[in-house]
């Protein structure tokens, strides 16, 4: 599985606190091994982001992604309220 990151994801990732970046990197490594690991709480967010899913980074932070045929594109990262409100 190949991971890609949108410009928006990269920009928001750069602004995250170092501890959140570390956790995001951990979660992405886990995602590559098992995208439905219970810690990730991988779930659909199609009502807000059509065709997309979300994984937990921390208790409040989420990463939004879209699965394509040969890759997974992470399109956004942020707090629950930043992404869904």
Image (spheres, grey):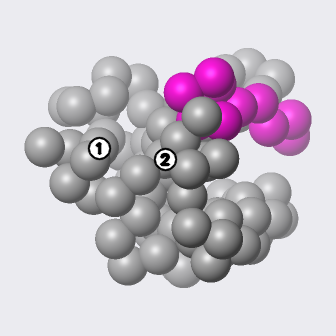
Within 10 angstroms of label 2, few (less than 14), some, or many (20 or more) residues? many
Q: Position of residue 63 (x, y in %)?
A: 50, 50
* Contact check, label 2 and label 1, Cβ < 8 Å: no
State the residue at coordinates (63%, 23%). Answer: 7
Quickly name the residue at label 1.
Answer: 83
Disc on the earlier residue, 2 or 1: 2
Dot 1 lies on which element? helix
Drawn side of residue 55 relative to residue 49, left or right: right
Taking 8 as reference, is 65 above or below it? below
State the residue at coordinates (81%, 65%). Answer: 29
Specify the segment rendered in magenta: 1-10
State the residue at coordinates (54%, 79%). Answer: 39
Q: Is residue 42 visible?
A: no
Dot 2 lies on which element? strand
Q: Is residue 77 visible?
A: yes
State the residue in front, 17 or 24. Answer: 17
Q: Position of residue 77 (x, y in %)?
A: 48, 47
Q: Position of residue 10 (x, y in %)?
A: 66, 36
Taking 16 as reference, is 23 above or below it? below
State the residue in front, 3 or 58. Answer: 58
Cα distance in 3D space between marks 2 and 1: 8 Å
What is the quadrant of the N terminus in the image? top right
Indicate yes or no whether the magenta region holds residue 8. Answer: yes
Quickly name the residue at label 2.
Answer: 77
Q: Position of residue 2 (x, y in %)?
A: 86, 35
């Amino acid at each position: 599985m190949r991971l890609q990151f949108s410009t928006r994801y990269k920009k928001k990732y750069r602004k995250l606190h170092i501890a959140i970046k570390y956790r995001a990197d951990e979660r992405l490594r886990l995602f590559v091994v098992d995208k439905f690991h219970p810690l990730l709480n991988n779930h659909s967010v199609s009502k807000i982001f059509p065709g997309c899913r979300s994984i937990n980074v921390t208790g409040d932070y989420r990463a939004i992604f879209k699965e394509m045929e040969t890759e997974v594109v992470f399109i956004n990262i942020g707090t629950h309220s930043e992404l869904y409100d």
